Image: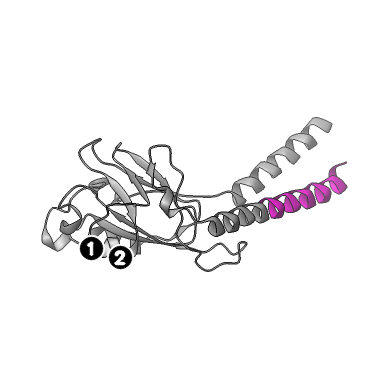
Amino acid sequence: MESSKVFLLFFLLFAIQVVFVTCTQFQVGDKSNGWEVPKSKSDQDMYNQWASKNRFKVDDTLNFNYKKNSDSVMVVTEAEYEKCHSDNPIFSSNDGDLVFKLDRPGSFYFISGTAGHCEKGQKMIVKVLGSPAAGTESPPPAQSANQNATESPDHHDHDHHDMKNNAVAMHAVTAISFTTSVMSFLGVFFF
């Protein structure tokens, strides 16, 4: 009888963690397109249309499927997005099959780094919803840490880094407090 109580307790704790640690991986352009130059002028806004149909939150990921070394993904500033050009991207990868983590609320500006692709519509704005626990609307842009990345140190923002660490700490304390409360509550009934 005692082992079934322990099993139930662990199962409930696992279920609670699943509820609090949910993030989604989005396939950019859905499975039919991937990250490629739009096939016609009428499709030039297809990535922004795709992004507007989805709801992104902090810690979700974007999966960019493209052929290695024949295309690329760059995260740039809004001004660089508008010009379809960046000599100094915030983030850049040409390794194919990139998984990019949306690590903050606010807007991310993606372009292809291959000459002429962005001008033909291979670009996208992703708006990430703020985190209620962090208590911020939209902090300044920051770099995303991805293993396939070449990053520019010129874009490092210490204030955002501190804010991000504080938000992570706040989430951890909230999750630990909630888990401890649930364990105490369950302990009253099972032990």
Q: Relative to 96, is 181 above or below?
A: below
Give how far apart the Cα atoms at labels 2 and 1 are: 6 Å
Q: Which residue bears the numbered disc 2?
A: 79
Hey, what amino acid is under mark 2? Ala
The span picked out in magenta is 172-191
Q: Quadrant of the C terminus?
A: top right
Q: Quadrant of the N terminus?
A: top right
Q: In this view, does 185 lie above or below 79?
A: above
Q: Is residue 72 above or below residue 1?
A: below
Q: Where is residue 112 in the image (x, y as percent from the top left)?
A: 24, 50
Where residue 45 appears, as percent x and y from the top left, is: 22, 62
| Colour scheme in use | one colour
Query: Amino acid under label 1?
Result: Lys
Magenta region, main secondary structure: helix
Dot 1 surroundings within 10 Å: few (below 14), some, or many (20 or more)?
A: few
Left or right, 177 with reference to 44: right
Question: Residue 1: in sight, yes or no?
Answer: no
Please provide percent x and percent y for residue 177: 75, 53
Q: Residue 152 carries which label?
A: none
Q: Is mark 2 on a helix, strand or loop?
A: helix
| Residue density around tag 2, few if under 14, some if 14–19, many if 20 or more, within 10 Å | few
Residue ID at (66%, 52%): 169
- Give the quarter of the image for residue 82: bottom left
At x 87% / y 48%, what residue is drawn? 188
In this orientation, which residue lies closer to the viewer: 34 or 81?
A: 81
Q: Does the magenta stretch include residue 160?
A: no
> Element under label 1?
helix
Callout 2 touching callout 1 (CB < 8 Å): yes
Q: In screen coordinates, is 123 left or right of 131?
A: left
Q: Residue at x 67, y 56 (%)?
A: 170
- Residue carrying label 1: 83
